[in-house]
Image (cartoon, rainbow, N blue to C red):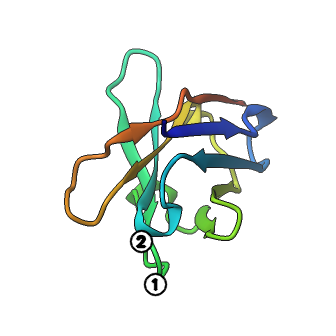
Amino acid sequence: QVQLVESGGGLVQAGGSLRLSCAASGLTFSNYVLGWFRQAPGKEREFVARISPSEGRTYYLDSVKGRFTISRDNTKNTVFLQMNMLKPEDTAVYYCAARTTLTTRYNYWGQGTQVTVSS
C-alpha cells in the first residue's frame, strides 16, 4: 500500500520560511516523479513544483520561482519543499504526489499539510 505523508506545515509571518517534507512508502521511490501541489480556500488545486526521478530536473510554478526549492533524498524516500520569502498568497493546503514517468497523471497523493502566511 502506497503512502505519502506530509509534514512541516504551520503558521509563519510574511517573509518567513518553512520546509515541507513528504515521506513515501510502498513504492520504488527512485522510479517516481514527485510533485507538490497546493489548494487555497475557494480555489482549484494548482501545481507548485516537481522533480524527476534520478536526474533531479525541477520545474516550478512561475510565482514561486526563486523562492521555493524542491529536492529529494532517494535514500530516505523523502521529497522536500523549501519555501522562502513566503507571501500571504502562498497560504494553502500543500499536497505531495507521485507518478511514474509513463504518465502525466499523479497516481498517489498525501493527505496535505496546512501552510498559513500572515501579513
Look at 32% across and 27% down and name the residue there: 44
Give the CA distance from mark 2 to mark 1. Answer: 6 Å
Mark 1 crowdedness (10 Å alpha carbons): few <14, some 14-19, many ≥20: few
Residue 12: quadrant of the picture: top right
Q: Is residue 33 visible?
A: yes
> Of helix, strand and loop, which one carries label 1?
loop
Amino acid marked by disc 1: Glu
Look at 52% across and 34% down and name the residue there: 110
Q: Nearer the viewer, residue 84 or 36?
A: 36
Residue closest to the far bottom: 55
For residue 52, the mark is: 2
Residue closest to the far top: 42
For residue 8, the mark is: none
Classify 117 as above or below 107: above
Q: Which residue is mark 1?
A: 55
Look at 23% across and 47% down and name the residue there: 105
